[in-house]
Image: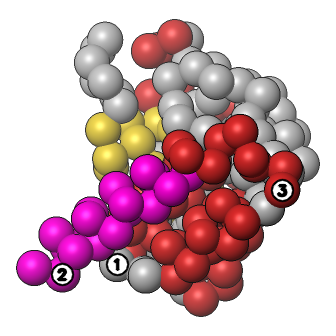
Amino acid sequence: MPNGGSDCCGTCWFNRANGGERGHADFKIPSHCEIRQLEISNPYYTYCANHPHHRPNRDPIPIGPVYVVGGMGPREVWQPSPDTEEIRQHLLHIVREPKEHSDAYPFYAEPPHKKAIQQMVDFGDERVVEALEELAQRDEVQKARANILSLIEEVRQKLAERRA
Ligand code: SF4
């Protein structure tokens, strides 16, 4: 697999060429992402966080951008995330409930909660801070609280830089 990643559009159930199943795209059918309405010209070199390796429960709400890779280089943003209130609410849910959204495929890509935080920052949506503050208050994150508080500061700073 290119870039070592099998989490590409070529194997994704949201690629029309896979007929709704995980698998290997039928090259006779043009690859098309059904959840982002994108023509995918190079399915084995194109990636996103909604791939079934990352979202095994079939999550059709876009998380972050679509990436491409050329040669052995890093993944680079090809298409930004679409932006709707439903997408933002979904990202906020992932931020508040990181356990519920853990990723069983930790290669080449960040876990969904990191992607969700980054995407909310990219949207300039300050509600991400509230969602993280809510998470930091929970009893079950006691051991990770210091890290979450420092993450909140980092996110605040990024949002301020974005506003400047
Ligand atoms: S862009 Fe994402 S959701 Fe769409 S086909 Fe590719 S990996 Fe699947």
Q: Which amino acid does label 1 sit on?
A: Gly
Mark earlier in primary sequence (2, 3): 3
**Cα distance, mark 2 to mark 3?**
33 Å
Q: Which disc, if any, is residue 139?
A: 3
Mark earlier in primary sequence (1, 2): 1
Select label 2 or label 3 by which is in front: 3
Q: In which quarter of the image is the N terminus?
A: top right
Q: Mark 2: is the Cβ under 8 angstroms from ligand 1?
A: no
Q: In this view, does 159 lie above or below 154?
A: below
Q: What residue type is labelled 3?
A: Asp
* Membership of 75 in magenta stretch: no
The residue tagged with tag 3: helix, strand or loop?
A: helix
Task: Please give the residue where the numbered disc 1 appears in the rendered image.
Answer: 124
Horizontally, residue 50 falls left or right of residue 126, namely right
In the image, what residue occupies the spot 66% across and 80% down? 89
Task: Please give the residue where the numbered disc 2 appears in the rendered image.
Answer: 163
Residue 28 x, y percent position in the rendering: 64, 36
